[in-house]
Amino acid sequence: MSLSPSPLPPSVIVTRLRAAGCVFAEDEARLLISTARTPDDLAVMVEQRVVGLPLEHVLGWAEFCGLRIAVGPGVFVPRPRTEFLIRQAITLARQIPAGPRPVIVDLCCGTGAMGAALAMALEGVELHATDVDPTAVECARRNLAAAGGRVYGGDLYQPLPATLRGRVDVLIASPPYVPTEAIGLLPPEARVHEPQVALDGGADGLDVVRRVIAEAPLWLAPGGHLLVETSERQAPQTVEAVARSGLTARVAGSDELDATVVIGTRPAP
């Protein structure tokens, strides 16, 4: 239930948010006011945001590809740039020849936002997701329940059913790709409130990315696609890893979203 009028005047909320460094203070104030259920809730939510809790953690949800994705403390918040990967995945999935429903796997799934967006766009998919963080697994199960998605706790491919080997049509991953030494340069919202395991990609940021790529050919169906989010600077190394794995590699990017996706395709017979 939204509050109108608010016991805290919107102008006061905006002033407090702006003083705390919130660039989009007016937009955030509107979201807080419309989401709060009671005056007391609103006061608590404003205070949480002022002290630096990510807006999405305060609201309890994040918008992603037109969906409201449930988030909570200690869970990586889906980024707008990742919507570009979803657009690419939807285009590729729609090119799959008619037949059994497409098999989608989301590695390092976090909240399950990517899988939920694909399931909404494609309908009738067989969806599987994994994450090593138990908190993320529980969150993803909430977000993927309506799509019938199955979420597994474990390291990358390890918890997936062996019956998926050689059957995956679209394999998506937004693994951690921030170099370890750059973690300290991230905004406090990420550095302090999001799990390290979802951010730290090792010395060059590509430790987990390489592991995702190395095993992908075992799981992809002939003609299946791997889509990995990375940075523009890391794209050449990522492409090299994809090519070494035996997949055909290409790069897609969006200047508007500051997004880079490396796509690997398993050759069809």
Image (cartoon, grey):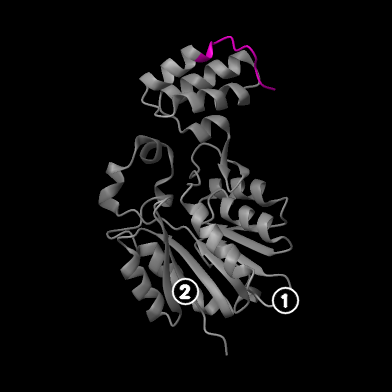
**SS at mark 1?**
loop
Residue found 39% across the figure and 40% down from its top: 190
User: Which amino acid lies under the numbered mark 1 shown in the image of this protein?
Assistant: Ala
Check if residue 2 falls in the magenta segment. yes
Q: Position of residue 22 (x, y in %)?
A: 40, 27
Q: Position of residue 254 (x, y in %)?
A: 42, 57
Residue 148 falls left or right of residue 12: right
Q: Dot 1, how many residues are within 10 Å of its Cα: few (below 14), some (14-19), or many (20+)?
A: few
Is residue 192 visible to the viewer in this orientation of the structure? yes
Label 2, on which residue? 264
Residue found 59% across the figure and 59% down from its top: 129
Region of the chain picked out in magenta, as a range: 1-10
Residue 92 falls left or right of residue 76: right
Label 1, on which residue? 98
The main secondary structure of the magenta stretch is loop
Alpha carbons under labels 1 and 2: distance apart = 21 Å
User: Which amino acid lies under the numbered mark 2 shown in the image of this protein?
Assistant: Gly
Which circle marks residue 222 in the picture? none
**191 and 138: which one is in front?**
191
